[in-house]
Image (cartoon, rainbow, N blue to C red):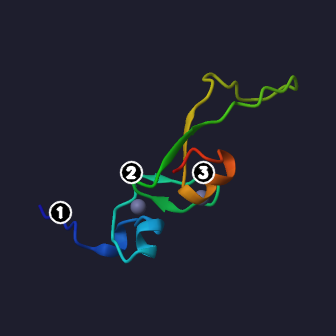
Amino acid sequence: MKHSRRTGDFMLRCYECALYDKVEESVAICIMCGKGICMEHAHRIDLPIWEGGYPTPVKVMKKGLPRFVCSECGNILMPGSCE
Ligand SMILES: [Zn+2]
Ligand SMILES: [Zn+2]
């Protein structure tokens, strides 16, 4: 059994690291822009689940599901929290 971990194309790289010529495997996807982001660049945000009074087929069970955004979007969503 071969596990080829060196097939770079299969790895989703951190977009922000790529900007600095670094290759880092991404651990999350920015929910805002869809970029791959590594642990270092992922920012956890707890978005409130919008609770409308209208009927929805899927019941939202959890509140404030953890989401990840890149630094760029994190700065937009939570100014000052991504320093
Ligand atoms: Zn990164
Ligand atoms: Zn983003």
Give the left or right position of residue 22, taking residue 62 as reference. Answer: left
| Numbered disc 1: secondary structure | loop
Ligand 2 under 8 Å from disc 3 Cβ: yes
Which amino acid, by three-letter code, is at mark 3?
Gly
- Measured as percent of width and height from the top left, residue 28 is found at 46, 51
Q: Quadrant of residue 67?
A: top right
Residue assigned mark 1: 3
In front: 31, or 41? 41
Q: Position of residue 50 (x, y in %)?
A: 76, 31
Q: Position of residue 76 (x, y in %)?
A: 68, 53
Q: Secondary structure at mark 3?
A: helix
Left or right: where 60 falls relative to 1: right
Location of mark 3 (residue): 74
Camera-side mark, 2 or 3: 3
In the picture as drawn, the residue positioned furthest to the bottom comes out as: 21
Which amino acid type corresponds to the residue marked 2 in the rendered image? Met
Eyeballing the image, is 28 above or below 65? below
Marked residue nearer the N-terminal end (1 or 3): 1
Q: Residue at x 54, y 49 (%)?
A: 82
Give whichever of discs 2 and 3 has the lower sequence position.
Answer: 2
Distance in Å between CA atoms under marks 2 and 3 = 14 Å
Seen at 63% across and 60% down, the residue is 33
- The residue that disc 2 covers is 39
Mark 2 CB in 8 Å range of ligand 1?
yes
Q: CA distance from mark 1 to mark 2?
A: 23 Å
